[in-house]
Image (cartoon, grey):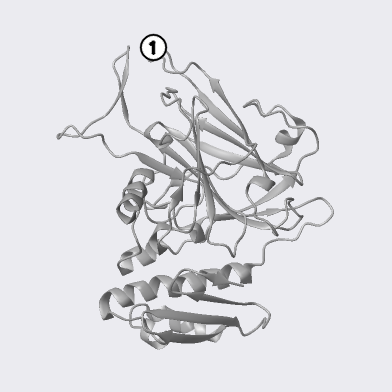
Amino acid sequence: MRTIAFILIFIIYPNFAFAQRNMNEFLQLQPQPQVYYVQPITDVITIDGKDNEDSWSKAVWTDSFKDIEGLQKPHPIFDTKVKMLWDKENLYLFAKLEEPHIKGYLKQKDTIIYHDNDFEVFLKPNLLSPEYIEIEVNALNTVMDLLMTKPYRFGGRANLNWDTKDIESAVYHAGTINNPKDKDEYWTVEMKIPVKSLKYFGEGDQIKANEIWKINFSRVQWLYENTGTTYSKKKDNTGKNLAEENWVWSPIGLVNMHYPERWGHIKFIDSSNQLFIDEQFLSLEKMAWNISYLQQIYRNDKKRYATSVLELSKLYPEILNERKKYGIIFSNSNNFYRVEIKSKTKPTLKTTIDSRGNIYF
């Protein structure tokens, strides 16, 4: 069974890494993830791939997607952006993907959709739970969805038998699909994702104002040759397909979407109660994960976890500055650590993180 699980991991996402391995990777994980404030709907949304409702006209677009590794990589050649809305029962998504040659071939649900050009949604409604959901869709509106028990690097597995119950999705083409003879403009994806399909017993089946989720969006774009009559993926000198482009809303820093802590935050707001995400909360969360990243690098070198900030500072001296803002207490045993981090200016703001990737606020 263990062998089958690891084969499945590589099928679902072949470029994953178990954990960051060096300081260069650590530094790539430093930019602050994106934040988006989701407005409520004001009229009925019809899921048809078009954003012609009044609510969509008022929704704010995200920033254009960047390369998954960040701003040090070339800017994507085609524009991609998303906007979101909500009501108590649903999250609504609308994505617009610029594309001069719209193409899609996979038609069976739960095939590995990113073998086509695709649009992907990664959702983590419960910040304290390790589980998260991945949804992929191509230009034919073929959907693959799965539940991750936790990130691969912490031993997570992908459950492809899981379904986002009652999800609605639609695709619209500003052009013609699979026609090499003409030039297209863009394709869109519209989704209605029921909250009850994302949450477990006891978590509630409605969205509440000021609730915060983690979310990210990815666009997989393959390089194609156009002969005028057919499309084919470009290949290298060995005959292997050239690597796909990975463009995302909130850059990860690595070619690996399975770092949920690097996804963006969304907050559901309404006109009567618009509270912004606490910057101190974002800083505390980042501090906790920085300790996690540094602990993995330290263990790779020393064959044990660090027992203090002072030991971690041998890798990253700047972490000593964090002691001015936080009280940091390490609890270690063989092959395990747990770190408690508490704000010195706001004592109620605290978190713990451990070597299994569990984080608590």
Rendered residue at 40%/70% (across/down): 293
Q: Is residue 281 left or right of residue 31?
A: right
Q: Is residue 339 left or right of residue 225?
A: right
Rendered residue at 75%/53% (across/down): 269
Q: Position of residue 337 (x, y in %)?
A: 43, 80
Residue assigned mark 1: 181
Residue that lies at the very extreme toward the front in this rendered image: 1
**What is the secondary structure assignment of the residue under circle 1?**
loop
Q: Position of residue 106 (x, y in %)?
A: 42, 26
Q: Looking at the figure, which quarter contains the C terminus?
A: bottom right
153 or 178: nearer the eye?
153
63 relative to 94, above or below: below
85 relative to 6, above or below: above
Does residue 77 appear in the picture of this structure?
no
Does residue 90 appear in the picture of this structure?
yes
Rendered residue at 80%/34% (across/down): 43
66 relative to 359, above or below: above
Q: Position of residue 7 (x, y in %)?
A: 31, 48
| 10 Å crowding of disc 1: few (<14), some (14-19), many (20+) | few
Q: Position of residue 117 (x, y in %)?
A: 42, 32
Q: Quadrant of residue 348?
A: bottom right
Q: Is residue 199 left or right of residue 231?
A: right
195 or 177: nearer the eye?
195
